[in-house]
Structure formats: C-alpha cells, structure tokens
Amino acid sequence: MRNKSIEFLRKDAARVRKWYRKNRKAILERSREQYQRNKKRKLSKAAIWSKKNWARHKASMDAWRWRNPEKMRKARLRLRVIRKDAIYIEHDVPMPKNKRCPYCNVKMNSKWPASNAPVIDHIKPIARGGHHVPGNTMIICNRCNLIKGNRSVKYLKKRLLLDAPTRIEASGSNHTPNPNGEHHVKRSVACRACEED
C-alpha cells in the first residue's frame, strides 16, 4: 500500500513540474500582478513578522548574504555610489582578453578574496568624483585594487615598480616584465632580472 502511495506522489510531482514548465510565464505574470495589487499590505505584514521574529529574520538574511556574496558586493557598491551623489549605470565590465591584470600581469583565475581574483576597479575613484559608468571601470586583480585604494593609477604603477625587485628576489628566476617594458627600480637599485635580460 505504501509503495503505491509513494509511486502516486512521484507521478503527481512529475505532472505538476510539467504543467509548471508549460505555464511558467503566465504564473509569474499573475503573481507579479497580485503582488503589485497587494504591495502595501504584504510589505507591512513582512515588517510586522520580521519585528516579532527578528532572530529568525536576521539568521535568514545572514544565510542569504553568505550564499550570494556577488549580489551583496554589487548592492554595497551601488549604495556607496549613490551616497557620493555619483552616476551609477548598471553594466558588465569585460574581462581582459588574456585574463591577466593590466597592471601587474598576473593571471586572474581565482575567486574573491584571493589576491589574484578579478575585481572591478574605478579608474577615477568614486571617492574623488568618479562615476560607475562603462568608461570609468575595468577589471584588475584584487591585490592591485587593494594597493590602489582610492588613489590614482599613477600611484599604483609607482608602487608596483617599487615592489617588483622584492617580488622577483623572493620568487627566484621567475621574472615577469612590466607590461610597459620599463625597468623596475627600488631605491636606485636596478632589477637584477632586468639586467640579466
């Protein structure tokens, strides 16, 4: 008897899934219309529920934030831009074709918060009057973004030139030349790897 009821439930679930796939657009449209008609009432009910059950609400929000770090990062960026009265245009920032950081030439193949993870950088920082628009954004590695902070690209290039000899000495013979072809200089001591080339 029990096996028959389980089999019936499986068939019923398959039938419901098939029906939902077939009528998905109509169902979503109907639910959107219903939400718009009852928006105030639903929001007030949700607010009352979250006040009464604040611990559960906080736990579910924390879990959602943990599962969706990219959405959280986008939301924080948008709020930061709006607070600075800057222009915010939602757009996709293209990854460099060779998937390397345009400044330090490192391969960007990790996930955030790794140092070689690809992140969005504002060429003119938002804190200094820049906007979140296609012409002012680019993808660079997380390390370069942290070094640059809210300073100019000129500062970042200078810091990378100063850090290059210590990175080369620490890594041995793995020398990655500067993308601009400039020699690395630290306290007027030329880069040994560049001298050997």
Image: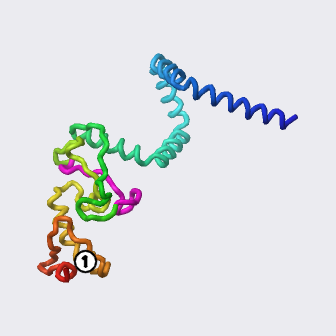
Estimate the x, y position of residue 81 in percent, counting from the top left.
Answer: 26, 41
Q: Is residue 197 above or below residue 14?
A: below
Looking at the image, is 150 positioned above or below residue 10?
Answer: below
Image spot of residue 142 (x, y percent): 32, 59
Quadrant of the image containing the N terminus: top right
Q: Is 50 positioned to the left or the right of 117 in the image?
A: right
Query: Magenta region's main secondary structure?
Result: loop
Asked where in the image residue 171 lies, by quadrant, the reply is bottom left
- In the rendered image, residue 139 lying in the magenta stretch gets the answer no
Instruction: Give the residue drawn at x 41%, y 57%.
Output: 111
- Secondary structure type for disc 1: helix
For disc 1, the marked residue is 166
Instruction: Classify residue 113 as left or right of residue 2.
Output: left
Single out the residue that lies furthest toward the top: 37
Where 159 falls versus 70 (above or below)? below
Residue 117 higher or lower than 57, as above or below: below
Closest to the observer: 49 or 35? 35
Instruction: Spot the residue most to the right.
Output: 1
The amino acid at mark 1 is: Thr
The span shown in magenta is: 108-125
Q: Is residue 123 magenta?
A: yes
Identity of the residue drawn at 47% across and 18% down:
33
Q: Residue furthest left?
A: 188
Mark 1 crowdedness (10 Å alpha carbons): few <14, some 14-19, many ≥20: few
The C terminus, quarter of image: bottom left
